[in-house]
Structures are given as C-alpha cells and as structure tokens.
Image: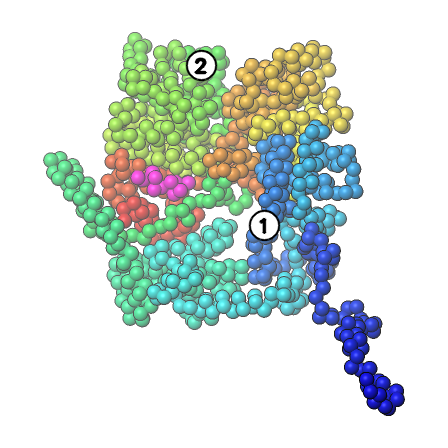
Amino acid sequence: MAHLGGGAEAHARFKQYEYRANSSLVLTTDSRPRDTHEPTGEPESLWGKIDPRSFGDRVYKGRPPELDEKLKKSKKKKERDPLAEPVPVRQSKRRRLREESVLTVTEEGVYQPKTKETRAAYEAMLSLIQQQLGGQPLNIVSGAADEILAVLKNEGIKNPDKKKEIEKLLNPIPSQVFDQLVSIGKLITDYQDGGDGAGGVAANGDEGLDDDVGVAVEFEENEDEEEESDLDMVQEDEEDDDDGVENGSGAMQMGGGIDDDDMHEANEGMNLNVQDIDAYWLQRKISQAYDQQIDPQQCQKLAEEVLKILAEGDDREVETKLLVHLQFDKFSLIKYLLRNRLKVVWCTRLARAEDQEERKKIEEEMMSLGPDLAAILEQLHATRATAKERQKNLEKSIREEARRLKDESGGDGDRERRGYADRDAEGGWLKGQRQLLDLDSLAFEQGGLLMANKKCDLPVGSYRHHSKGYEEVHVPALKAKPLESNERLVKISEMPDWAQPAFKGMQQLNRVQSKVYETALFSADNILLCAPTGAGKTNVAVLTILQQLALNMDADGSINHGNYKIVYVAPMKALVAEVVGNLSHRLEAYGVTVRELSGDQTLTRQQIDETQIIVTTPEKWDIITRKSGDRTYTQLVKLLIIDEIHLLHDNRGPVLESIVARTVRQIETTKEHIRLVGLSATLPNFEDVALFLRVNFEKGLFHFDNSYRPVPLSQQYIGITVKKPLQRFQLMNDICYEKVMAVAGKHQVLIFVHSRKETAKTARAVRDTALANDTLSRFLKEDAASREILQSHTDMVKSNDLKDLLPYGFAIHHAGLARTDRQIVEELFGDGHVQVLVSTATLAWGVNLPAHTVIIKGTQIYSPEKGAWTELSPLDVMQMLGRAGRPQYDSYGEGIIITGHSELQYYLSLMNQQLPIESQFISKLADQLNAEIVLGTVQNAREACNWIGYTYLYIRMLRNPTLYGLPADVLSRDLTLEERRADLVSLPFF
C-alpha cells in the first residue's frame, strides 16, 4: 500500500475504514449509569418474577379509610345525641348494583372454588362436614367449611392443635375424619385467607358489622352529597357508568305507546300487556316493589298519587316526581311505569269505569287524542277476541244449548236458573268484559306464615331480656279463672244412661266440656269450639257423635246404623290412626264401626257401607266429595267434624274451605241438615270462622283462652340475632344447654329437633358440655335403683346411640329406631328415669308423653316438596308446646322456642291469640273452581260468583278488603263484593 503522507492524521483517516474499528461500533453497549426505573423500551422476561398463585392477592376487601372516619363521626354523633332519629341513607346505584352482583353473593360461604378440581374437593369437604353436623342447612355447613379451611391453611399451627380447633366446631371427631379433612384441604389450592378482612374488623369489638349483612352506614346530615357519593364509586369505570345512566334516562323518555318497532327492541321485557291492567294493577305492582312490607292503605294512597303523576306533564317531569314519591331504589319500577305510561293511565281508567256508558266516553276520548291511544284501544279489543277465546265461547254456547234442551222437559222450577244463565249472557259475563286478575300476585307469598297483625300485645307480666347474640321474651303462665257462681262441672253419673259407656273410667267433664255439654249432646246446632291444646276437645266430638246416635236409636235402645254416616276430618295421617283407635275403643258398646280413609288406607265399597264413622284427612275427603259417582254414601253424612280448623290459615286451608263450601251448598240444595262441628285452637277472629261454618253465635260459638289450659303454660321465646350461620348454630346449642341446666334435677325436659341425626347430635352436645362443666350428676337420680334400671336397659337396646346415652339419663326418639327401642325409651321417660329426651316431631303427634319443660330447638325444617328449608307449620309448633306440663304432677308447664330473631313476632302472635286466621283460597282458586265445574255444582259464571260467597275468603274480604287487594271504601260501593267475585271467577270463563 502506498504511503499517503500526512503523518498521524493520515494514519487516523486510514484506520477509520478498518473492519475491527467499525464492527465494534455495533456491539459496544452504552455503559453509562441509567435510572433503573426508567423504561428502556426493550422487551423483558417475567420468568421468575410472578407466582400464578398470587394473582389477585392485592384485592382489598376491607372498608376504605374514609368510610371508617365517617363511621367514627356517626358514632360520636350518636353518643352526643342518643335520642336523635337515624338519618335514612339513600344508596347509590353503583352500590346497589355491586350488592346484587353474582360475584358478591356469598351466602354459601366466603370461599368460592375457581376450578373443577377444587370444586370437587370442596364438595367432598361439605359432604364430610354434613355427616358430622347432621341434617343442617347449607349455609351452616358452608360456614363450618370456611372456618375449617382457615384452620387447615394456617401454617403456624401444628396438626394436633388444628384438630382441637376443628373439634370446637364439629365436636370430637375421629383421627380418620381429621386426616380426610387435611388431605382434602391440600387439594384446595385456590383458597385465599383475605376474605376475612371485614370479619377481622368485626372480631375486634364491632359486633354490628357482619359479613352476611354488610355495613349499616349513617352519614352526617351536613356533609355534602358529592363527598358521600365518592365513597360508593369505583373510579376506574366512572365514565362508562355515567354513559350507562344517560342511556337509561333516554330509554325512560320513550312514550308509553305500542308502536310495532318497540316490540322488537332489546328492552322488550319492559313492555306491558294491556289485558293485565285492572283497577288495582298499580297498587299490586307498588306492593310487590316494596316486598309486601308496605301497609295496604298507604299502598293504595301511593298508587293514587302515582297515577295522577303519570297522567300529567312530560316524561322528564314525571320521572322527577316519581323518584321523589317512590324513592330512588325503585328505579326499575319507575322505568317500567314510564315506558308504559299511557297504558297504565288509560287502562286503569277504563277498568274503573262504573258502567258501559262511562267506559264508552273514555274510549271516545282515547280515539280523539292521537294514534298512540288508538293503538292501545285496538290492542285492548284485539285481546278479547282471539281465536282461542272465540273457540271457548263457541263451546260454551253449545253446552248452554245442550242444557236448555235437557231442561225443557223439567218444570218451571228450572226456568229461573235458565233465566239467570240468560241474564249472565246479556250482562256480559261471557263476552270477555270482566277484568282478568293475576291470581298469583294476589295470593299471599308467605302462605301459612302470613302475619296480618302489625303488633303483638302480650299478657301482663311479660318482659324482654337482651343477651349477647340473642333476645329473650318471657310470657308468664296465665292463672286459671275461678269457677263462676252459675258454673258447675257435669258428672258422668248425671248423663243419660245410654251416653255413659263412652266416658267409662271418667268421673266428670272438665270446665270446657261442661260448658259445651248441653249444646253438643242435646241439640243439632253447628258448633265452633276454640280451646287450648289439651283442653279435651276430643270429648266434645264424642258428645256430638252420641247426639247423632241418639237420633237413630229405637225405643228398645238399638241403633239403626244404616241411616247415617259421620266423617271426622283430622289434619294428619298420624292423628287419623290415633283418632280411629280412640273412637273404636270408646264406642265399642254401641256397635259402631270406625275406619281410616287416607292415602295409606283405602276402603272398598262394602267396607264403606259397613262403616259408620270415617276418619280421614282433608285432602282425601275433598277427593271423595269431588267424585259425583260416590254420592250415594256422601248423601248419608249427617255429621262432619273438622279438627284443627285453624288450618284455614295454612297452605292446606283452601281444601278445608272447599269441603265446607261444598257441604253447605249440599245442605241448601237437598234441604237435608248436616251438622258442622269445628274444633280449633284459640284464635283472635273466631267470629269469622263461626260465620264460615254457619254457627249461631249465641248457641254454638264457644271460645276459651289460654287460662283454660289444663296445665298453665309459661313461655320463653329466644330470637337469635347473630347473622353468621355457623355461629348461630353453635349459639343455639349453648342456649339449649343453659335452658336444660336451669331445670336439671328438678324436672324432665323434652327437646324437639327436626332431623333424626340431630337427635343424637343434640343429646351428645348437652351431655358432653355437662361432662366438661362437671354438672352431669344433676341428670342422674340419687337412688341406685334408677341407675341400675338405666344400666340394665342399656344392654337391651339395639341402637348404638342409645347405648351411649342411656347410662347418663339421656335418650333419643325418632321413627328410625326399632320399635322395641322406642317402647323402652317411652317407658323409661314415662317412669321418670330418663331426664332429657331429644326427639323429632313424631313424638308430639304419635305418643302422648308430656314433660314439664319442652324446648323447640330451631324452627327450620327441610321440605322435600319445596326442596328447601322452611319454617315449621303452626300446627306442629302448637302440638309440640301442647306436650309441656303433666296434668297429674305439674302446677305449670314451660315451653321454650329457639328461633331466628326475624320470626320472633310470628311465634309470639301464634301462641298468644294475636294471629288472625286469613284465607289462602286465592292460591288454589282455579283448581277448586274447576273441580266444582267438573262436579256439576257450578255451571255458569253467575253460579261461580255465588259459590265464592260460601268460602272463608269472601268473609275475610268483607272484614279486611285492603289485605286482599281491594280499596278500603269498596263496601260503600259494592256491599256484597259482587264485582270482585265476578273478577275472581272470570279466569275459567273468559
């Protein structure tokens, strides 16, 4: 290479093109110090930096600090002014949406499995816990699972300590069960213990804050709205949420017309069928929005105000007024009313029109006010003349014509009935002009648990006592009233000779029976007897049976058994068998045959002919009387005895109403008297039931309060206020133990539970607690003979549970035990050797084993028909408490009910004659009316309307119209509620 000259400068120029110098420019990195937090833009691997198990571990489930500050302020304000009224707080829409979200519904426990594998493991754990706890609701089992998971996942506790902690929840468990729980706990890999954030705060002394119910927040009055709402917001989605609200208000401004385009919008569920709107549609809709908690009169007033608002002003103005009247949390109802505004206003006006002339004027006004209202009117008329209804009317006219031809051969007697039918047609009965009612919405959702009374007045001397986690209400035993000057007890020897064999072994009748004696035995008047459980109502039934036998007795004392039949309706199959045995024994001397007719026991035609007294259930007798072919022997019935007629209030009440209505109509049709006898517990509105049974108030109505109970009853009602299911369950066990210990050694205790497994669980829980507290000796009699008897019988029983419990003076009783075991338990308890007996309801119904103290532990029972846990029926509760107090030995009995705090008023009302008997007939109206139509006793709409007049529903609608969806002043316009009855029966006819 030639030398270029230039010395060092030339050498540098040469070097800059050399390969090594240029290649190093690409590979050499910038070695200057760089801020590590500054993004470089270069891709980085996350390998080793993220643990998949920690996803979501920064989720904050506690309360924001701002909310805590507000709670502190609120507390200070309360302390300063304890008498101040609490400020009602309006929840923001965001908070409501968050509370109703599927993600926040954690009724079944805090832990929610996230994979199939963990779900399978969790379900296995629930199954294992269910076996240990017995038959308990799912929320209790889930609560226990959460507590156990928290223990198992706590790495700071060793296994022996974990077992002790778990045994505090489940009672002692075998090591094998604990090992299973540990292995299942290892399979649950997605459990996070962060769910107890809120719970931890509550545990630190604030009992009012509970996971189940959230936080009750009260804000300062003078704080501005903006600051308050900030706490409710999720800041990230604020913009989206605002858009959503905007769209919602836009949708609300749409008219109430019925354009075809509207029918196909995404929000088509908001459209209302005009045929559904009757005069009281708006009132029912508002009542539903308030979950039936609003007073009927207030609801009616609110409905009238809302109707006026809907009728005037533009949509924006109406929306504002509705928000003020209906409160902000009724947003969906307001949106629904605005969307169907025109329909609601005008269809309600049409439904309230008093006559056809007024209706015609309203229709003309609608036609003149524009196409929207004209479209509503067209739809209203179109729904009345569908092809299906035209077919129905055609079939009815054919039937009417057939009846007319058939009746032509009959005399003038039937022309009046035909005249009614003709008048029905002329009056619009079959032309679809009646309003169709939604029977489902009119029926009481609560069923037999309906409380129409607003408050419960307790006897003098009652008091409340608050303890940690529960509230107690004590009702003292009523003292028996002294005998009046003209009152005397009837001796059996004073009765007619032919009546005495039925009362063999008795010396005299009691006070209740003596007062009813004259009417029951010597007259044929209908009777309603309201008396406490154990007052001897069965003997009154025997007196009425003897009166019927006397009517068919010849001069020589022989009885013509072919001229009569007596029907005794008992509420349960277990009672049916008991009544059959009782009556068969007592009426043996009269040659009377008593047989059972129930779902388990059917009778042949010959057996029915040979039977004089049929003991049956309401459902079975309803089926028998529905069959027109079986009328040969139902026509022979001369006496109908209905036991526990207060079941009218229960879900089975419609069957009783149907039976009585059918019988009364039969009496009027055939002109042959059938005596009706109703036996009932004490109830406040007994006069209504007496009217229903056609009882003469002066001659046949007998009402006795709780002071006539053979053994006065002292009552305790315990309402659990704790919200967490597992804690509630454990507290119930603790209270049960305390109440047992209060009488241990003095009196025997009968504890009623609601599953077979729970009998042994409860008995062991009380025994083990007594063992731990060194109080077990109080359950064993001091004499060695009693202990020896218990020990000897322990070897005789087959049940392992009984073998474990009997030596300590405890026993269990349920249908799953062998018959010999049940008999041994009954004998030992009857003789006083067993001090504590834990039983299911079968003991209350089947065997008469009274005890001084009766405890009903929990009122939730599993219903296989509904597939859910429901409240005990009133009949079961009264029967169980009827076992409290032994007539021969006790001066008073003690009944204790342990239930949820929300059910406290219901049971107080039930047991203290404060619970009015209401009608449940609307829930089964269509079925019962169809049965009458098939039977032939109802042949047209007019007859159906008259038939409603024979029901208990009709009597209660007259007494309390607002409760049944009628305006308070309806009787001033329609004294016999003919319009309402016509609306009720319109469903099958139009």
On screen, residue 704 versus residue 475, left or right, reads: left
Can residue 719 be seen from the camera position used here? no
User: Does 649 lie within the magenta span?
Assistant: no
Q: Secondary structure at mark 1?
A: loop
Percent of width and height locating residue 552: 30, 16
User: Is residue 920 one of those drawn in magenta?
Assistant: yes
Please identify the quarter of the rendering in which residue 65 is found.
Answer: bottom right
Q: Write down the region rendered in magenta.
A: 919-930
Left or right: 732 as drawn, with respect to 523: right
**Point 66% across, 58% down: residue:** 218
Judge whether residue 848 can be spotted in this image. yes
Residue assigned mark 1: 105
Residue 601 vs 294, above or below: the answer is above
Q: Which residue sits furthest top?
A: 556
Q: Main secondary structure of the magenta part?
A: helix
Amino acid type assigned to the residue bearing label 1 in the image: Val
